Amino acid sequence: MQTVQFGTLNYLVLAIYLAGMLGIGVFFARKQESGEMFFLGGRKLPWLAVAMSMYASLTSAVTYLGLPGTAYSENIALIIVCIMSPVVAPFILLLFYPIYHRLQVTTSYEYIEKRFGQPARYGVAGLFVLARLGWLGTVVYAPAMAMSIVTGIPLWGCICMMGILATAYTALGGLAAVVWTDVIQFVILIGGAIWVAVSLGNGVEGGTAEIFALAKEAGRLHIADWKFNLFAMSGPVVAISFFFQLMQDYGTDQVTVQRLMATGSLKKTVKSVAFNACTDFFIIGLLLFIGLGLFAFFHGTEIVNGIGSDKVMPYYIIHYLPQGISGLLITAVFAAAMSSMDSGINSIATVLINDFKITPHDSRITDVALARIITVGLGVAATSLAFYVSTIGGIIKAFASFMSLFSAPVLALFLMGVLTRKGNFQGWLVGLAVSVPATLWLQKMVEAHWVYYFPVSFLVAFGTALLASRFFNSAPAPNELTVWKK
């Protein structure tokens, strides 16, 4: 693979962006007067800013690089996610957020304590921490990988740079800094995707029509295979998988719940979720089109034989776009990653302090100071995990591995809580004990396609927990903690 200099102009563009993010953290640092302000922005953040932050947080570099890579190397079956996002939105707004706002929770796991007791709260909060730490490893690794390709800087150096910077402004400014940096990052990552798509449409001889013609000929448009195949991705399987995964991401995961609770009202939460669903519909389709465009652009060439599918997009940006523009688009990859990392470490810190009741031993250490200390520690942990993720191979597969093991059982407990009055924590523990080894077996022994990981883990945990709950005596849940209000 040929080496191309990143260039002075590109470095300047990237440096301005990174300095701007740090500047926002410094600006909000002086406003962090309490834990409520650090973790929820005083519950007064504008709904549109929260919506942009929520989207930018979950649209990490895993999505930004992984979706084009999947369309480039496999097919566009993930286009089904465009449909599932607005389909899931009414479910989470009816099942979860009315209860959260009624209880005025800081973390979604406060609901679990009221429904199942304190041990259950510790259990799901612990699984959240494990899942999101693994997730953070992927969102640091992905842009570091891209940066290493385009600049020649060693991968370890890029990982450290990414981790240190995102940790710094998050520790300084709390959730307010996270949300407002995410707003800027949202604009950059959307604008960057549009630019690459237009560039590919103009760069392929025959334009968009030729891109789709080549994709159809190569089977990249094939999404409606109804045959059961554990080793391939198809439309129906993607629909089932992402229905549950999006319900977890937007309905129970603290990264999202924390933002939506910061709006202060259910009405604003509805607006934020609707905005996010519409944006999902647009950007997922756009990223998959980029993958098809890259396939058409490099069709019949051997130039990218040594590059994995996750790396094709940054390779195209730096080799085929002009200086300045390529720097801005690589910055979009950074934006996608940093918006996820800052949100992740802020949310994990919130859970550690609010759910695990971590308090300072020294009375001179304030709540904000403790939050900053924990945030820095989490940043170091996430950066370290990025080195492990680099050994898994394939950023979407790495992401799916962590989330299926730890987050799918969490969704099972939340749904048991809101949908049943007799489901209990002991039954869920049995479900967890069965789902974790079953998921590891699916991943390591069967080596099934990653799209099966999450739904299998959820269904095993939920089904087993419901059955096992019948063998444990527990008092029925109060009506106000379920959707069955009389």
Image (cartoon, helix red, strand yellow):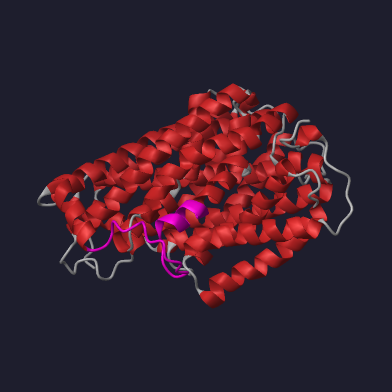
Left or right of 291 in this view: 130: right
Q: Is residue 180 visible?
A: no
| In the image, residue 239 lies in the stretch drawn in magenta | yes
Q: Residue at 82% of width from left, 51% of height from top? A: 119
Left or right of 75 in this view: 373: right
Residue in front for this viewpoint, 455 or 124 = 455
Q: Is residue 92 above or below residue 145?
A: above
Q: Is residue 52 above or below residue 410?
A: above
Q: Residue at 82% of width from left, 37% of height from top? A: 363
Quarter of the view holding residue 38: top right
Q: Is residue 90 visible?
A: yes
Q: Is residue 346 above or below residue 261?
A: below
Q: Is residue 315 above or below residue 256?
A: below
Residue in front for this viewpoint, 307 or 14 = 307
In which quadrant of the rendered image does the N terminus lie?
bottom left
Quarter of the view holding residue 157: bottom left
Left or right of 470 in this view: 222: left
| In the image, residue 227 lies in the stretch drawn in magenta | yes
Q: Position of residue 250 (x, y in %)?
A: 56, 41
Q: Position of residue 314 (x, y in %)?
A: 30, 54
Left or right of 71 in this view: 320: left
Q: Residue at 85% of width from left, 43% of height from top? A: 476
In terms of secondary structure, what is the magenta stretch mainly?
Answer: loop
Q: Which residues are magenta?
A: 218-241
Q: Residue at 56% of width from left, 71% of height from top? A: 442
Q: Position of residue 27 (x, y in %)?
A: 52, 28
In which quadrant of the rendered image does the C terminus lie?
top right
Residue in front for this viewpoint, 250 or 456 = 456
Q: Position of residue 68 (x, y in %)?
A: 33, 54
Q: How many marks?
A: 0
